[in-house]
Amino acid sequence: MERQPKRTLKSPSQLVSDWASDLSAFKVVWGKAMMWIFLLSDTFIFGSFIASYASARLAASATNSWPDPAKVFALELGGREVPLLLIAIMTVVLISSSGTMAIGVYHAYGRNKRMTALFLVITALLGLTFVSMQAFEWTHLIRDLGFRPWTNPMGAPQFGSSFFMLTGFHGLHVTIGVIYLTVVAVRVLKGVYDRGSYVGVEICGLYWHFVDLVWVFIFAFFYLF
Amino acid sequence: MAHSHPGYHDHHIGPEPQSWWTKYVFSQDHKVIAFQYVLTALFVGAVGMGLSWLMRLQLGFPGKVELINPTVYYQAVTQHGMIMVIYLLTALLLGGFGNFLVPLMLGARDMAFPFVNMLSFWAYFLSVVVLLASFFVPGGATGAGWTLYPPQSILKGTPGSDWGIILMLVSLLLFIVAATMGGLNYVTTVLQLRTKGMTLMRMPLAVWGIFVATVLALLAFPALFVGGVMLLLDRTVGSSFFLPAIVQFGQQLPREGGSPLLFQHLFWYFGHPEVYIVILPAMGIVSELIAVHSRKPIFGYPMMVLSIVVIGALSFIVWAHHMYTSGMNPYFGFLFAVTTLIVAIPSAVKVYNWVLTLWRGNIHLTTPMLFAIAFLNTFLIGGLTGLLLGNVIIDFPLQDTYFVVAHFHMVMGVAAIVAIFGGIYHWFPKATGRMMNETLGKVHFWITFVGTYAMFLPMHHIGLTGVPRRYFGFENLQFIPESVRDLNVFITVVALIVGAGQLVFAYNLVHSIFWGKKVGDNPWRAATLEWQTPTPPPHGNWGDQPPPPVYRWAYDYSVPGEKEDFIPQTRPQVTAGAGGGGE
């Protein structure tokens, strides 16, 4: 299992010579390096999506203005409109799942098979809850409010298009993450990682934290802004 | 330092596959995957060349060929561009040369994740199948121009707006998946799988070029992916990301508020790095060829590495120079003109260094060397016209004329393809154990090289007279002088000859695989690591031995006082004395 040795601050020239040394630039297993590189690439995908959404929002005209997300995503609770209620719960669920993931990785460091698998399953269930709530939200918007990917009754058609595109692509990532977590949990229970290292759990965790982080940006830029 | 990190010695690659299917079809061996990439790309490239013939026939002899109507012409223009830039050049340089050279040159047994590498090829193969299938669907392939600008690319009236555009976009998305899977492998392999002693500053320039190009691919393709997804949604579900309110054929379309300019930004944010994704590996390959065949160390190696990295970084902040006339804010154009012209500095550094490498070298005019020199001057000529086009005020009259067509064909079309030819002639003996025929190679070279100038020099002139590109016919356009028509006939005839000349290469390739002259492990007497393995390299590249440690940089040619005029990277430094103690 790779525990990071305690690091001290290095001078830039030392950093360069370390990276440029032979064998490997980063002292981590290949899978971890590859996941980091993939996430960097994926960041650019979400970055492009969010930039496109920003451009559409800025271009929304006065006659066909951008709806107020607080109003669109409000739910009635006890006769009062509570803005962003469901979204807030979804955010809490997803961020909590990052916490359970971290606990799972902690147990993976300790090579604790059952606890690792348990927390992976909890994380996957929280992810599943998130996707289900998202499905509920989509249904609510489509059925009750008359949203369509090409138009919506609230204002600029790009509002609906961007919403379905952004949350859809993120939801796809969460769904893939749930499947990924389940596969890793099964492998943990089968003892695949006991033969070698538990680093596979940590790599899976990297992906999961990334998906959560992306949600924070979508939450901030699409719902709150 | 004694870390317990996994080095190459931990690299478990699977046992050598035994059955025909796992050995040649679903192979996880990086060399086999490289051949699959090369052959598929060459095949689809031949299709792209055939399409260029259709275009040239129409331009040279308008109306003489029954087959070509405006629809076919626009489909040919579009698919020629798309195929050549993405499915031929990108796939062949990254998928082909990247796969073959990176592990061999770095002393790795294979790519980091051979299985993902195999998936990468099959995703690419699928994207090619989808692309070719688009020719046979109702309405045919898309004819929107390779940039696929909305709104016209998805509206009725454009060829292939029914199914062609959908298949085109699906094919592109598949290609991006393939490029990402391959790219993750190349970057991880370069960063993590180098052999003992192979520091970053000892890597051959070919690996540097492929490495930086792959990083660009991983960061640039996402923008195309997003643009493609949104365009696909606009076409299929009817959203209006890119479509403003439009009246077509007297009817108001149910769209409003979208921005066509947004697609252009997304496309060129990918599209400009894409140019360097193609040219950086080509530059790397040419650096190898020039050093080996002039028996001289590459001049200014650290500057060569730095210029590759700087070109790569700059490529992300120049994209809007493709959009000067698009109606964006004029100050934007000023900014991008400045960054564009700055790219000339690292590019010029590279050209000077190549020339200085050649200077007083022991130049062997072998076929690979001829192609490398061809790269130098097509890149130079194309680069100089790029300096003109990079200025907003010069670009305005020349935008969308044949001057632009001539420019990018010289600088990234022909330059990249001659680098590829040079690379194939150079590494063919390593891949197969046989030489390609030199005489046929030289015939192929002279047809290609002279033909290039015969085609594209007149095309600059045609562009300067203001002839617009992508036009099906030029009847009744009074401003076009008679000489342009004659030149167009000339260019078409040359294009047909050059195209046919590529058959010499195809024949040479196939013939040499079976009947070429057998050679030893290192026929060019090159210093880099891939020539120090058995030929053809076995599964795992280095046999039962651990990969050899490296003691020096890749360009120890003609070292004074040495018996031979090259020193392999694997030979210990004399001063190192007890260093390594390996082989």
Image: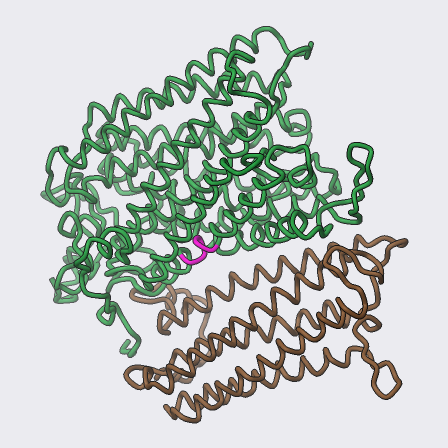
Chain colours: A brown, B green
x and y percentages locating residue B430 in the rendered image? 19, 44
Which secondary structure is most common in the magenta stretch? helix
Q: Is residue B533 above or below residue B372?
A: below
Between residues B485 and B456, which one lies in front from this camera angle? B485
- Residue that sits furthest to the front in the current view: B138
Left or right of B27, for residue A27 = right
Looking at the rendered image, the quarter that the C terminus of chain B falls into is bottom left
x and y percentages locating residue B163 in the rendered image? 58, 42
Report the residue at 42% width, 27% height from top.
Answer: B50
Between residues B583 and B546, which one lies in front from this camera angle? B546
- Is A171 within the magenta? no
Report the residue at 50% width, 35% height from top.
Answer: B135
Please state the total of marks drawn on the protein image: 0
Left or right of B373, for residue A165 = right
- Residue that sits furthest to the top in the current view: B482
- Is B180 within the magenta? yes
Quadrant of the rendered image containing residue B438: top left
Between residues A64 and B134, which one lies in front from this camera angle? B134
x and y percentages locating residue B435 in the rendered image? 17, 35
Quadrant of the rendered image containing residue A216: bottom right
Q: Which residues are magenta?
A: B177-181
Report the residue at 48% width, 75% height from top.
Answer: A179
Looking at the rendered image, the quarter that the N terminus of chain B falls into is bottom left
Left or right of A56, for residue B513 = left
Between residues A6 and B239, which one lies in front from this camera angle? B239
Report the residue at 86% width, 88% height from top.
Answer: A78
Q: Is residue A79 above or below residue B417?
A: below
x and y percentages locating residue A51 in the rendered image? 68, 58
